[in-house]
Amino acid sequence: MGEENKVILHGVWASPFSKRVELALKLTGIPLEYVEEDLQNKSPQLLRCNPVHKKIPVRVHNGKPIAESLVILEYIDETWKNSPRLLPKDPYKRAKVRFWTSFVQQQLFDTMFTVTKTEGEAQRKAVKEVSEKLQVLEEGIKELFPNGNPCIDSQNIGLLDIVILSLLGPHKVQEEVLGIKIIDPEKTPLIFAWLTAINQLTVVKESTPPHDKLVALLKFLRENSLKSSA
């Protein structure tokens, strides 16, 4: 691969935002150089490539950096058009995918983080809110899966699949650490089937860190959050 086509990804192994981009690049078959960042000691390259937010992920292509995971995913879709597309060609379907992607990003992510870093009444309130928002998502995605059976493979996995995976793909890890049922197959059977189908893909399995490693990390992050808020 020539220097002019070089793709570099600055990320963190446990970041759901980094994993989104890493998975999308693997799906498109684009060779990449992955740079693991230390967020306590960010590299000069990261700070130079993302001077505004100074955050990961940052993807560099042809020497040009792009930040923010959702922006990067759309760039990948628009740049490598011969690879499996992340967004539907039909304008209406594309708009619906963007709408529900925004819903997951704006409505579910923050609430799930609140569940992770709180306890007691604050956590119960956040869990109730997550449950309500999952019900909204369950109804909304019925239009995307009209036969009620999400058939996902490496050729049709898209933007919304990647984003929901980055949040709820490790729901068994979240449930083990928190002792709370996050994804209930009886209450949200379509979301449960959807996540199950995505998690069974070989490319997803290869990109997912070991369960025990994720459990240890989530326990560590939760304990730190509870200590700092005490």
Image (cartoon, rainbow, N blue to C red):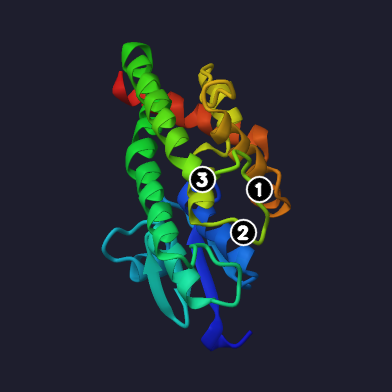
Secondary structure under badge 2? loop
Q: Position of residue 221 (x, y in %)?
A: 46, 32
Foreground disc of the pair 3, 1: 1
Q: Position of residue 223 (x, y in %)?
A: 44, 24
Proximity of marks 2 and 1: CB atoms separated by less than 8 Å? yes
Secondary structure under badge 3? helix
Alpha-carbon span between mark 3 and mark 1 = 18 Å
| Residue to which mark 3 is pinned | 166
Q: Position of residue 73 (x, y in %)?
A: 46, 63
- Label 3, residues with CA under 10 Å away: few <14, some 14-19, many ≥20: many
Label annotation for residue 156: 2
Residue occupying the point 39% across, 27% down: 130
Q: What amino acid is found at the position of numbered circle 2 in the picture?
A: Asn
* Residue 196 placement, left or right of 56: right
Q: Position of residue 53 (x, y in %)?
A: 29, 58
Q: Earlier in the sequence, mark 3 or mark 1?
A: 1
Alpha-carbon span between mark 3 and mark 2 = 17 Å
Q: What amino acid is found at the position of numbered circle 1 in the picture?
A: Cys
Label annotation for residue 151: 1
Q: What amino acid is found at the position of numbered circle 3 in the picture?
A: Ser
